[in-house]
Amino acid sequence: MYLDCNDEFNLKKIMPNNKDLKSLTTFFYAFSDNTRLKIIILLTIRPLCVGDISNVLNINQTTVSHQLKILKAINIVDCNRHKKNNIYYIKNSSIEEVLNATVDCI
């Protein structure tokens, strides 16, 4: 089926602009790495410190910290200081909805 000129114009109007596309790309980048995805899934269950994440996933703390730094930079996670530990949590509750919708799709 081919589009007539009016349909093509309307489709162009609703396409996200370059800034929004970059934001979408950055957002989905967070889910493109197995370790980051595991961390995101864990943090949707409850806030955790680096050591707890490391123990549950059986990966070293340096790797966890590196991935958390990436997730924090793209506004997926944030942290609060509690005694000597940073406790990481999902910054936006919609993340869990995105994960659930994605699981439904596959």
Image: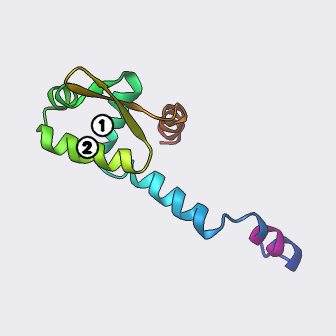
Instruction: State the residue lying farthest toward the right.
Output: 6
State the image quarter where residue 10 is shown.
bottom right
Taking 64 as reference, is 21 above or below it? below
Q: Position of residue 13 (x, y in %)?
A: 78, 68
Report the amino acid beneath label 1. Answer: Lys
Query: In this picture, is 56 found above or below 26?
Result: above
Task: Identify the magenta region.
Answer: 8-12
Give the quadrant of the N terminus: bottom right
Q: Which mark is residue 38?
A: 1
Mark 2 touches mark 1? (CB < 8 Å): yes
Q: Which residue is mark 2?
A: 35
38 displayed left or right of 77: left
Residue under the point 54% across and 37% down: 101
> In percent of the image, x 34 and y 41: which residue is there?
37
Mark 1 Cα shell of 10 Å, populated few (<14), some (14-19), many (≥20): some
Spatial CA span between label 2 and label 1? 5 Å
Against 28, residue 85 (above or below) is above
- Label 1 SS: helix
Classify 56 as above or below 37: above
Task: Indicate the secondary structure of the residue bearing disc 2.
Answer: helix
Res 11 → quadrant = bottom right
Characterize the magenta stretch by its predominant secondary structure.
helix
Residue 68 drawn in magenta: no
> For the residue marked with disc 2, what is the amino acid?
Thr
Asked where in the image residue 58 lies, by quadrant, the reply is top left
Q: Position of residue 57 (x, y in %)?
A: 19, 32
Q: Furthest-bottom residue in view? A: 5
Relative to the observer, which residue lies in front, 100 or 41?
41
